[in-house]
Amino acid sequence: MATTFLSTANSFLSSSSSSSSSLSSLAATVFFCPKKNNARRQLTFCRTFSESPSPPSLVLTKRSLSISFITSFVISLASRSNSSSANAAILEADDDEELLERVKRDRKKRIERQGVISSSNKETGYLQDLVYKLSKVGQAIENNDLSTASSVLGGSTNSDWVQKANIAFSKLSSGPEEKTQVDTFNSSLASLISSVTSNDIESSKIAFVSSATAFEKWTTLTGLVGQLKGL
């Protein structure tokens, strides 16, 4: 755009110079022109001027400025758009790489976890016994039969089946989320045993739902949800 303006200016200036020279020579020419007018003779000075249009001047009109501004603005927007696209492409590539790494880590964890589960048949048996006991306790509470629920639970968190269940929890829990669900389960189970012993049916129902929910979440996190019957 700047090159075009300079070229036009030079053309205008050279044209102006030649026109001014021509005008000066022609303006100096004076002719005596005899003219008859009935009875008298009159000398009339006739000056011949070569009229030429005034030399064009370099004027930046509002339209020229507007076109120049709009063109510059469009170029600026295009440059920003290209820059933004390039940055977005870089970020997207980084995101894809990060996602790929995450998928690889998750796959590695699943393989390792399946290996632990496959070598933990005894612990899986403890957990299967836990499922059966919770099922019986739930049915008893639903029938308002707290005496049966109490006999299944054993009356204390020191019962053999609770101790064995915690052995399985410790071996198969590999992350903080699993351990959080184990803590929730044990706390809810203690409340369940206390409520059943106190013949508090409503509190027993609430505690049972809480303990069963925590256990189900734990099995989902550890990948055992499909390997235990009755869930």
Image (cartoon, helix red, strand yellow):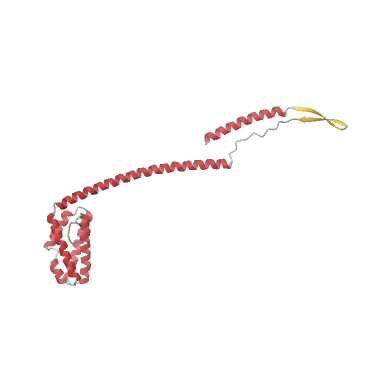
Q: Is residue 115 left or right of residue 96?
A: left
Q: Is residue 192 above or below residue 102?
A: below
Q: Is residue 95 left or right of residue 192?
A: right
Q: Residue at x 40, y 43 (%)?
A: 85
Q: How many marks?
A: 0
Asked where in the image residue 42 lies, by quadrant, the reply is top right
Asked where in the image residue 227 lies, by quadrant, the reply is bottom left
Q: Is residue 74 above or below residue 53?
A: below
Q: Residue furthest right?
A: 39
Q: Residue at x 18, y 64 (%)?
A: 189
Asked where in the image residue 81 lies, by quadrant, the reply is top left
Q: Residue at x 62, y 30 (%)?
A: 15
* The one of 129 and 226 positioned closer to us in this rendering: 226
Residue 135: x and y in percent read 17, 65
Q: Is residue 46 left or right of residue 12?
A: right
Q: Is residue 166 left or right of residue 84?
A: left
Q: Residue at x 29, y 47 (%)?
A: 99
Q: Is residue 105 visible?
A: yes
Residue 93: x and y in percent read 33, 43
* The one of 156 and 130 positioned closer to us in this rendering: 130
Q: Is residue 155 visible?
A: no
Q: Is residue 50 above or below residue 145?
A: above
